[in-house]
């Protein structure tokens, strides 16, 4: 005989192991709060299974009411954890409360009044909706990791369908008051799907998390933590090793930066660096990689650009930065400037290091010419 409750109990024990695994991984990556939400969601599902088991074995009404209350809360936490995975500003408790409070005021009391069939329809409908929303959130991002995230979307959506079928069968049979756990093909299918989905979703979630962590570590190795721009290594990986005649390197260097550090302190110096990085992002082209090469030196690598265009962009950046007012801890206000040097590749392709060296010579020519200006490293037609 197909024993639904015993199978669910086995799944609950497996779920406990998955929760502990997820929480142990969160302890090494405390920024990934979605793992906590996922564990809480599965935890509520496990409590639902135990309550359902007592209701099925002993017929305790309070156990049935509790099982009815717990399952959608677990689904709400699972949905919230998916949302939080893609958007860290999401607060799962708030989202869950908005869903849970109206439901808890309706379904469990209906169950307690003897209309357990009606309550189970509501329970399965809400659970299916929340899991489907979680699956759709994964589906929208499947390109980030087609197999892993696509598999998660599939598991969530199939599980949602199995819960919807449970409610649909009760509704179709007109079972408004049952008095015991329903036994039908939809319930049996739901148990099998839920067990497979729980283990599969747990494994895939761990896999996606490891890929995300590896990607984050790679990004960290390629970026400058102070400015948020690429570092030298990141810039090298963002562009090809050779530059053609319509590709340029623009090097920037903050003027008198050492004096700023000496006079106002390194905290203000860091603020100046961050301000220039923001100016690069705001006034440079979004398609051009931007990097902090070290200290007060920055670079942009431009593609499909003429000398006139490159010079115009560089001058716009310098003008915007020179207009930024900085306030020291003592209330003193001051402004900073920067200088820039431009160099281009050649028709046959020039090594990016050689182009950067020419841009560096042009940069120091700008320094010698009085700073706060742009100098090109070679004569070119401004088309």
Image: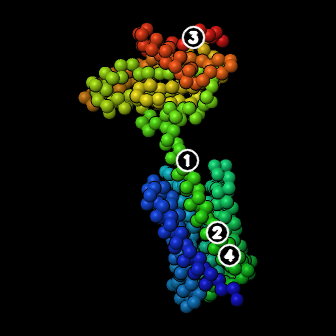
Mark in the foreground, 1 or 4: 1
Residue wearing tag 4: 192
Residue wearing tag 2: 197
Disc 3 is placed on an element classified as loop
Disc 1 is placed on an element classified as helix
Query: With respect to residue 284, does 95 lie above or below?
Result: below
Mark 1 and mark 4: span between their CA atoms? 34 Å
Earlier-in-chain disc, 4 versus 3: 4
Q: Residues within 10 Å of mark 3 (few under 14, many from 20)?
A: few
Residue 57's spot in the image, x, y percent? 57, 90
Residue wearing tag 3: 378
Label pair 4/3, CB-CB below 8 angstroms: no
Disc 2 is placed on an element classified as helix
Label pair 1/4, CB-CB below 8 angstroms: no
Earlier-in-chain disc, 1 versus 4: 4
Name the residue furthest left.
330
Disc 4 is placed on an element classified as helix
Question: Hey, which quadrant is residue 380 in on the image?
Answer: top right
From the image, which quarter does the N terminus lie in? bottom right
Earlier-in-chain disc, 1 versus 2: 2
Does residue 33 appear left or right of residue 238 in this picture? left
Question: Hey, which quadrant is residue 305 in on the image?
Answer: top right
């Amino acid at each position: 005989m197909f024993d639904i409750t015993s199978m669910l109990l086995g799944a609950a024990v497996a779920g406990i192991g998955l929760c502990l695994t997820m929480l142990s991984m969160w302890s090494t990556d405390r920024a990934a709060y979605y793992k906590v939400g996922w564990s809480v969601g599965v935890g509520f599902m496990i409590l639902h299974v135990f309550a359902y088991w007592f209701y099925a074995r002993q017929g305790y009404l309070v156990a049935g009411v509790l099982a009815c209350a717990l399952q959608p809360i677990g689904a709400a936490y699972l949905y919230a954890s998916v949302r939080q995975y893609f958007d860290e500003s999401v607060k799962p408790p708030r989202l869950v409360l908005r869903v849970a409070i109206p439901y808890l005021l309706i379904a469990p009391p209906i169950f307690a009044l003897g209309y357990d069939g009606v309550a189970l329809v509501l329970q399965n409908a809400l659970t299916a909706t929340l899991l489907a929303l979680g699956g759709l959130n994964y589906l929208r991002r499947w390109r980030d990791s087609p197999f892993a995230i696509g598999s998660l979307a599939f598991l969530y959506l199939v599980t949602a369908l199995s819960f919807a079928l449970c409610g649909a069968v009760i509704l179709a049979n007109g079972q408004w008051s049952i008095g015991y756990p329903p036994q039908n093909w939809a319930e049996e299918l739901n148990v099998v799907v839920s067990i497979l989905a729980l283990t599969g979703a747990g494994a895939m979630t761990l896999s996606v998390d490891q890929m995300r962590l590896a990607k984050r570590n790679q990004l960290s190795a390629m970026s400058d933590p102070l400015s948020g721009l690429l570092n030298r290594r990141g810039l090298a990986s963002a562009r090809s090793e050779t530059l053609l005649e319509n590709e340029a390197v623009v090097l920037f260097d903050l003027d008198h930066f050492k004096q700023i550090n000496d006079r106002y302190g390194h905290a203000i110096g860091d603020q100046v660096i961050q301000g220039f990085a923001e100016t690069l992002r705001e006034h440079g082209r979004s398609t051009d990689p931007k990097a902090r090469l070290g200290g007060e030196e920055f670079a942009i690598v431009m593609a499909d650009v003429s000398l006139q265009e490159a010079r115009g962009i560089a001058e716009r950046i310098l003008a915007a930065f020179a207009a930024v007012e900085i306030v020291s801890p003592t209330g003193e206000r001051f402004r900073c400037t920067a200088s820039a040097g431009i160099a281009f590749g050649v028709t046959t392709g020039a090594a990016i290091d050689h182009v950067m060296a020419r841009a560096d010579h042009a940069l120091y020519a700008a320094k010698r010419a009085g700073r706060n200006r742009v100098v090109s490293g070679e004569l070119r037609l401004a088309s």
